[in-house]
Image (cartoon, rainbow, N blue to C red):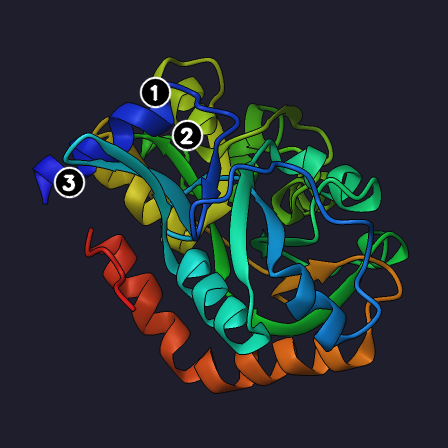
């Protein structure tokens, strides 16, 4: 387990920002002529380009195994199933979270799978599938400060980190309006800032907190929890996505929903998810 976490952490901490992984050997890094007109049209194209922020374990993260760098996690397992049901291959573009919707709108990617919540603001810029997972959020602090920060009030005027444009940012702005926010692009950057005393706490979802704490023994989950005020995590598609394509993806989500939490658990345990 330690060996696997070390391999995973080495790369994600290095801040790798862009990596294209072709499911079947393609090297193209741009989307194909905008949204497909039909499922048949999409299948003729043969491939979708999928945006994600691959520094959010256990949903999506880099893993180096036997010298091979790959993006793995529960969302990537979901992507495998979506691509299979759509009848296409896929390629991943790894980027900061706040750049994903921009890339989708500009046609650089065809889909976003990155534990993204369909907020009212985001729904103006994308069509969202059904929700495939909803969790809770927890404040992480340095181990030495766990007794210092036991309530939300104890962090009311402190410096707190979150992912830019994330649900966690929205929670902090609502619940701790006097706190100073530091917004970053990746969860692993948050853990580094926390460990290096650049922030007093960071807010992440519970599965992410579990793996970040395993990767860095100086930070821990506190007793401060927040419910997810959003609908949960869904897949973002371009505005005006074909109804048959959306129905196919929603069918995949309904089929895998009973398995998704098990995929999360395995990813948190450091087990690579196989087909």
Query: Which secondary structure lies at badge 2?
Result: helix
The residue at 62%/76% (across/down) is: 249
Q: Which residue is mark 1?
A: 195
**For mark 2, does the 10 Å Cα neighbourhood hold few (<14), some (14 to 19), or many (20 or more) residues?**
many
Q: Which mark is residue 4?
A: 3
The N terminus, quarter of image: top left
Of badges 2 and 3, the one in the foreground is: 3
Q: Residue 149 is drawn in which quadrant?
A: top left
Looking at the picture, how far across and down is residue 28, in whole percent?
59, 38
As measured in the structure, the alpha-carbon distance from the residue carrying label 2 to the one carrying label 3 is 16 Å
**For mark 3, does the 10 Å Cα neighbourhood hold few (<14), some (14 to 19), or many (20 or more) residues?**
some
Q: How many marks?
A: 3
The C terminus, quarter of image: bottom left
Of badges 1 and 3, the one in the foreground is: 3
Q: Which residue is mark 2?
A: 188
Mark 1 and 3 residues: CB-CB less than 8 Å, in contact? no
As measured in the structure, the alpha-carbon distance from the residue carrying label 1 to the one carrying label 3 is 21 Å
The residue at 41%/23% (across/down) is: 194
Query: Which secondary structure lies at badge 1?
Result: helix
Q: Is residue 141 left or right of residue 117?
A: left
Nearest the eye: 85 or 247: 85
As measured in the structure, the alpha-carbon distance from the residue carrying label 1 to the one carrying label 2 is 11 Å
């Amino acid at each position: 387990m330690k060996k696997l976490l070390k391999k995973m952490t080495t790369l994600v901490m290095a801040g790798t920002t862009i990596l294209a992984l072709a499911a079947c050997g393609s090297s193209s890094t741009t989307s194909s002529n905008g949204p497909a007109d039909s499922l048949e049209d999409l299948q003729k194209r043969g491939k979708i380009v999928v945006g994600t922020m691959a520094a959010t374990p256990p949903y999506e993260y880099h893993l180096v195994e036997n010298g091979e760098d790959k993006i793995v996690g529960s969302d990537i397992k979901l992507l495998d199933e979506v691509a299979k049901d759509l009848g296409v291959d896929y390629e991943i573009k790894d980027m900061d979270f706040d750049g994903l919707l921009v890339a989708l709108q500009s046609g650089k990617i065809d889909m976003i799978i990155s534990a993204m919540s369909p907020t009212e603001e985001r729904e103006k810029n994308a069509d969202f599938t059904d929700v495939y997972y909803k969790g809770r959020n927890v404040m992480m602090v340095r181990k030495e400060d766990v007794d210092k920060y036991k309530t939300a009030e104890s962090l009311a005027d402190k410096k707190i980190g979150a992912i830019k444009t994330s649900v966690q940012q929205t929670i902090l702005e609502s619940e701790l309006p006097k706190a100073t926010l530091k917004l970053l692009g990746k969860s692993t950057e948050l853990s580094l800032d926390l460990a290096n005393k650049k922030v007093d706490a960071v807010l992440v979802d519970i599965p992410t907190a579990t793996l970040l704490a395993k990767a860095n023994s100086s930070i821990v989950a506190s007793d401060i929890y927040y419910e997810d005020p959003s609908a949960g995590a869904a897949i973002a598609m371009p505005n005006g996505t074909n109804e048959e394509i959306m129905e196919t993806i929603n069918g995949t989500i309904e089929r895998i929903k009973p398995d998704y939490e098990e995929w999360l658990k395995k990813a948190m345990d450091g087990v690579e998810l196989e087909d």
